[in-house]
Amino acid sequence: MTKRSLFFHLLFDVIILLIAYSMILWIKPGDAEPYVRKYAIGLAVFLVIWIIISIASQKYTAPKRTSLINSVVYQVVVNTFIAGIIAILMYLFRAADYSRFIVFGTITLTTLFEMVFAFSEYYIYKAKRSTDSSEVFEKYKKIVGLDDEYPKSEVFPLEYTVDPVPENIRDTIIEESNVEVFNFLSENIDLNIPNYSLLSTTTRFNVEKLPAKMYLKIVNLKRINDIRFINKFFETVNRKLVDGGFYIGCVETKDQRKKRLLKKYPPVLNRIYYLFDFIIKRVFPKFNLTKHLYFFLTRGENRVISKAETFGRLYSCGFKVINEQEIRGNLYFVARKNRDPFYDMEPTYGPLVKLNRIGKNGKNIQVFKLRTMHPYAEYLQEYVYEKSNLQEGGKFADDFRITTAGKLFRKFWIDELPMLINFLRGDLKIVGVRPLSKHYYSLYSKELQEKRIQTKPGLIPPFYVDMPKTLDEIQASEHKYLDAYFKHPFRTDWKYFWKAVWNIVFRKARSS
């Protein structure tokens, strides 16, 4: 929706709300003038809340949904949510002198007016709706002739050349995005060689239409925030690319979205809007109770997604990010296909996560922790290792995968409390080496790897006794602990336990 369209929808909504308010005052017995003076401030607050939640929930795009029933129900759900917020505020601020008939009658009548408006606009929109969202590909196909004369089973040879990039292609890319994006594509793709597919789509269907393993590169100019099933989309792109092929796409990250919203609206109002936007589009999708409501309200469009989650999804779907660049508030990336997707059937978004770790005898165990990283961040250890250096204690420096709340959880070990479940299940013991992921495990020497899997990992690692600062020092610390443990198990764990407690309590030892 354009800013102009949003303005007219917003203006119309405010007008019908004021009309509904006036009609309710007219219906209510008695003189309306005292209510007008008494409710002036309350009405202003009500209008602010109504506008913010309506914009944040994308209520004004409801007529563009696939069925009239969905459009109407969608608006009813949003307005019911607003009524609930108003009811909570009236209770908290003890607004007992406000008429419930006036407040909730206004909401009900406004909802009826909106339903009529949605009915009219829905059919106008349906009459104008396009049948194909992959227009860029169709234009490109007509211009350079990507039809049956090219073999379907192999990539176009690199020595194949065509005339310089037609102005139609350049103009189409700039019209769909901007000049900077065209330059970015030109740096990563030889636009004179037709071995790529250029798309502008938010649906997997348009990717499925492409021939399998024919293109060396697939480009999508639409941001992934508006793709309903992101992993399925990435997996389909993976299947269509040849081995070693490249996928170029873009995303508006969580931080970029925050900057945009805070800049878009005036002070104070922008913070209120961002709060509701964060709750509806960031918190709601994380819990099973509200996830279905979120997807019903938004259809998965304009979702909030972090850089870590975006790249993590790419890695889980068989890609490796090799280039990235921020352009006008969006992050553009180049990812190379290096394997088949993992097809993660049970991705976790909630506060409690299960992490795959190496246990005794090399057995895979699932360690329970409170989430401190963005979803899919566990797939990015290799990426972060290549981009960052290990800091003191063996952690990554400037790890963008960690959330703001996650930093607090880690500081006070709140995230590790669920590991007590693993202790009760027998996966971990009180004192022992850290339970490591496969990537971290691969960084250790072969000798230490073999020693580690001879015993269970522990809740309290020898790290808190020796306080090593480098990876070599960490390995030396674990070597020393394991050698002592194999000789005198109980005595070693007893001694390490009390030394670790002393360092944690009195020397403020921390692992990160």
Image (cartoon, grey):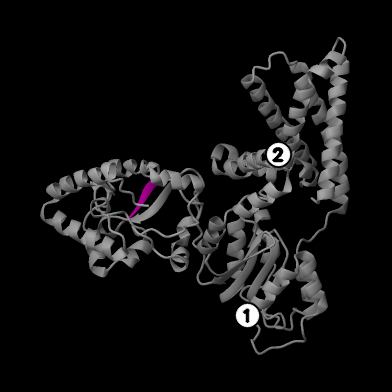
Q: Which mark is residue 153?
A: 1
Q: Residue at x 19, y 56 (%)?
A: 481
Identify the secondary structure beneath mark 1.
Answer: loop
In the rendered structure, the answer to whether residue 419 lies left or right of residue 327 reads left
Q: Main secondary structure of the magenta part?
A: strand
User: Residue 336: in sight, yes or no?
Assistant: yes
In the rendered structure, the answer to whether residue 84 lies left or right of residue 128 reads left
Q: Earlier in the sequence, mark 2 or mark 1?
A: 1
Q: Residue at x 75, y 15 (%)?
A: 99
Residue type, mark 2 in image: Leu
In the rendered structure, the answer to whether residue 237 lies left or right of residue 4 reads left
Q: Position of residue 183 (x, y in %)?
A: 70, 74
Q: Which mark is residue 269?
A: 2
Mark 2: give few (<14), some (14-19) or many (20+) Cα within 10 Å: some
The number of discs equals: 2
Q: Of circles 2 and 1, which is in front?
A: 2
